[in-house]
């Protein structure tokens, strides 16, 4: 039986969840794993704040050096969230030879190379399973279970807030604004929901996943990002008529030596495994040349699922003598600046002879072939009608160029949503 001395950076909801798990499950962990943990110091902003766990005040400190410079602390668990000062504190811990366990996707994605370099240089461990999809063990699967595979794609629903919103819009025909307000009342969305609904949260996570899957660094700034705030009930309804379900997808593919990494709303066929992932659940769909296709599913957020993943990493870190870091090339991946897929295009068009010919002709000049077209609803009082197209598989760049050349006196209010069938 060995005892590992640990320190906490931060102690909000997730930190309190970890504290409770270690207290409640400590004896079982000791029996099963032969490891016990002593929490020596906990960095907090204010000792007087009410918390979700009964923590002795003697453990708490408002000075980060009490954690980062204490030679008896060998593992630092970071729960602060955000980029700074979390990233700087983690770097200091690693440079002091301390192992770091974190769920902080933002700090990891924006400081990946610095953190990995510090861990490698100082023979320290860096564990971050909880940074992507909470308790779903997707990072461990990629790093440990699928090493023999050449992973070709990773596609996931990795933000629970947006999945909840789109699920409600699909089931009820509700508006984006109304469902967002409900999500905020339920605590599923932040008062400022930008990070979730505009795709930033998913982009941080995809940067980490794609870096690990393809063994080349995919900077978060290279991830194409588009949120769901422009999605309307009409888009969802039209997609359903084509047998499609709308999700905010994080997509990473390796094609001809280039990496696509993109976060955006996308339709998937109703029979695709990701189509049935509803509400705040997450799922990641992985394709490998040897393993084939597999899907990881579960609760991707929440205090206790995240705490569960953090404690699992803590146990693994304590039992590891020589910490392994992912085999990732230091040079950034070569990123694709274009990709091909089916496109859903909805536009408001003048209901008069020749308009459809102009639209189809413009698409054709750019090599975009139309697979199907429907008119939605009746002509409005201004003489406009909703037209919805599904293209054949086409270049993103060509679709955008064609739409950019459309005569705006004839068509307006264009909305484009990609369709992922793979």
Image (tube, rainbow, N blue to C red):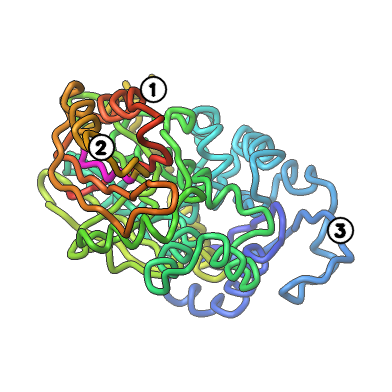
Closer to the eye: label 1 or 2: 2
Q: Helix, strand or loop at disc 3?
A: loop
Near-viewer residue (139 or 161):
161
Residue holding disc 1: 332
Q: Position of residue 402 (x, y in %)?
A: 28, 26
Q: Helix, strand or loop at disc 1?
A: strand
Q: Which numbered disc, 1 or 2, marks the residue that appears first in the sequence?
A: 2
Against 231, is 349 above or below?
above
Q: Which numbered disc, 3 or 1, marks the residue that appears first in the sequence?
A: 3
Closer to the eye: label 2 or 3: 2
Q: Is residue 120 magenta?
A: no
Instruction: Give the CA separation, mark 1 to mark 2.
Output: 15 Å
Q: Residue at x 29, y 61 (%)?
A: 245
Residue holding disc 3: 46
Instruction: Give the CA separation, mark 2 to mark 3.
Output: 45 Å
Numbered mark located on residue 40 in the image: none
Numbered mark located on residue 253 in the image: 2
Please report the bounds of the magenta region as a residue range.
341-346
Q: Position of residue 398 (x, y in %)?
A: 25, 25
Q: Is residue 371 left or right of residue 305?
A: left
Q: Residue at x 85, y 52 (%)?
A: 62
Instruction: Give the CA separation, mark 3 to mark 1.
Output: 40 Å
Near-viewer residue (33 or 127):
127
Q: Helix, strand or loop at disc 2?
A: strand
Give the class, few, some or many, for how many residues have Cα within 10 Å of label 3's Cα (few <14, many ≥20). few
Near-viewer residue (232 or 37):
232
């Amino acid at each position: 039986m060995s005892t590992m001395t640990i320190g906490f950076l931060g102690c909000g909801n997730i930190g309190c969840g970890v504290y409770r798990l270690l207290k409640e499950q400590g004896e079982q962990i000791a029996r099963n794993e032969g490891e016990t943990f002593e929490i020596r110091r906990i960095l907090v902003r204010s000792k007087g704040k009410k918390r979700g766990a009964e923590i002795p005040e003697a453990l708490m400190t408002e000075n980060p050096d009490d954690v980062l410079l204490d030679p008896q602390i060998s593992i630092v668990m970071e729960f602060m969230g955000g980029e700074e000062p979390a990233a700087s504190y983690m770097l200091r811990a690693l440079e002091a030879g301390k192992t770091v366990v974190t769920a902080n996707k933002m700090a990891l994605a924006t400081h990946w190379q610095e953190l990995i370099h510090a861990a490698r240089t100082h023979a320290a461990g860096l564990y971050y399973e909880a940074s992507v999809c909470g308790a779903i063990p997707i990072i461990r699967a990629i790093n440990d279970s699928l090493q023999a595979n050449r992973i070709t794609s990773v596609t996931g629903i990795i933000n629970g807030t947006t999945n909840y919103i789109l699920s409600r819009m699909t089931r009820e025909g509700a508006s984006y604004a109304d469902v967002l307000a409900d999500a905020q009342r339920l605590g599923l969305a932040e008062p400022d929901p930008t990070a979730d609904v505009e795709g930033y949260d998913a982009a941080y996570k995809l940067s980490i996943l794609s870096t690990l899957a393809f063994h080349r660094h995919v900077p978060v700034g290279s991830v194409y990002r588009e949120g769901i705030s422009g999605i309307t009930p009409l888009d969802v309804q039209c997609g359903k008529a084509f047998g499609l379900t709308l999700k905010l997808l994080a997509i990473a593919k390796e094609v001809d030596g280039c990496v696509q990494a993109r976060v955006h709303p996308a339709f998937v066929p109703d029979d695709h495994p990701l189509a049935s992932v509803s509400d705040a659940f997450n799922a990641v769909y992985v394709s490998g040349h040897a393993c084939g296709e597999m899907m990881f599913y579960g609760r991707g957020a929440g205090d206790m699922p995240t705490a569960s993943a953090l404690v699992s990493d803590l146990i693994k870190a304590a039992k590891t003598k020589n910490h392994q870091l992912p085999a990732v090339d230091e040079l950034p991946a070569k990123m694709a600046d274009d990709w091909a897929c089916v496109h859903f295009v909805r536009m408001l068009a003048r209901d008069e002879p020749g308009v459809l010919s102009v639209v189809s002709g413009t698409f054709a000049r750019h090599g975009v072939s139309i697979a199907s077209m429907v008119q939605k609803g009746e002509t409005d009082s201004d003489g406009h009608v909703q037209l919805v197209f599904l293209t054949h598989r086409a270049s993103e760049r060509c679709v955008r160029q064609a739409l950019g050349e459309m005569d705006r006196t004839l068509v307006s209010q264009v909305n484009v949503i990609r369709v992922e069938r793979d």
